[in-house]
Image (tube, grey):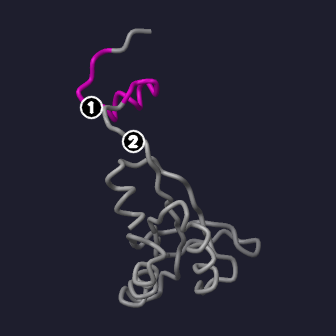
Amino acid sequence: FRMRQVSSYKLCHWVNPSCIIPCNMERGVCLVQTTLPGDWLEPIAAEWATGFVRDKLASCVHRNLVTSVYHWDGSLESSDEWRIQLKTSINNKDKLVSEIQKRHPFDTPQILAWLAESTDEYASWVEG
């Protein structure tokens, strides 16, 4: 197998995962994601999500309206939801997840967390 040269490092990494991307990604941050009811008005979803940044549990939050398809009570459902993705330090993840559980309107909220590689500068900013 011979790889041809590509101009995009992302494409190179997708074609051959052993390709080294020329970026120093030695640190990590934690991404935490949840969803909120899609019938919430944007200012309500924004206030709920922004509260975690205001309380210094997250350094940044992204929110966008998505359509989710899922099984619930034996039926296939589809509904709009607000996807909320928060960035926090590794040390702050458990506090953030606990607070999301306390504030969440769903009985069974989706709460996902994963470690993401980061530049040193971005991780330092996230850590405050």
Please check the rendered image and state whether residue 36 is part of the magenta-colored stretch, yes or no. no
Marker disc for residue 8 = 1
Q: Position of residue 32 (x, y in %)?
A: 52, 65
Marker disc for residue 25 = 2
Tell me: residue 82, above or below residue 122.
below
Quarter of the image where the C terminus is located:
bottom left
Is 9 positioned to the left or the right of 48 in the image?
left
Marks 1,2: beta carbons within 8 A: no
Which image quadrant is residue 124 in?
Answer: bottom left
Total marks placed:
2
The label nearer to you, 1 versus 2, is 2
Question: Please, what is the three-letter code of the amino acid marked with disc 1?
Answer: Ser
The CA span between labels 1 and 2 is 18 Å
Report the magenta residues as a range: 4-20
Which image quadrant is residue 76 in?
Answer: bottom right
Q: Position of residue 78 (x, y in %)?
A: 56, 71
Tell me: residue 22, above or below residue 53.
above
Is 33 positioned to the left or the right of 49 in the image?
right
Identify the secondary structure beneath mark 1. Answer: loop
Please check the rendered image and state whether residue 19 is part of the magenta-colored stretch, yes or no. yes
Identify the secondary structure beneath mark 2. Answer: loop
Residue neighbourhood size for the residue with mark 1, other residues' Cα within 10 Å, grouped as few (<14), some (14–19), many (≥20): few
Near-viewer residue (36 or 67): 36
Question: Residue shown at 63%/77% (left/top)?
Answer: 98
Is 87 positioned to the left or the right of 108 in the image?
left
Tell me: residue 23, above or below residue 87.
above
Question: Residue shown at 40%/49% (left/top)?
Answer: 118
Q: Position of residue 51 (x, y in %)?
A: 44, 85
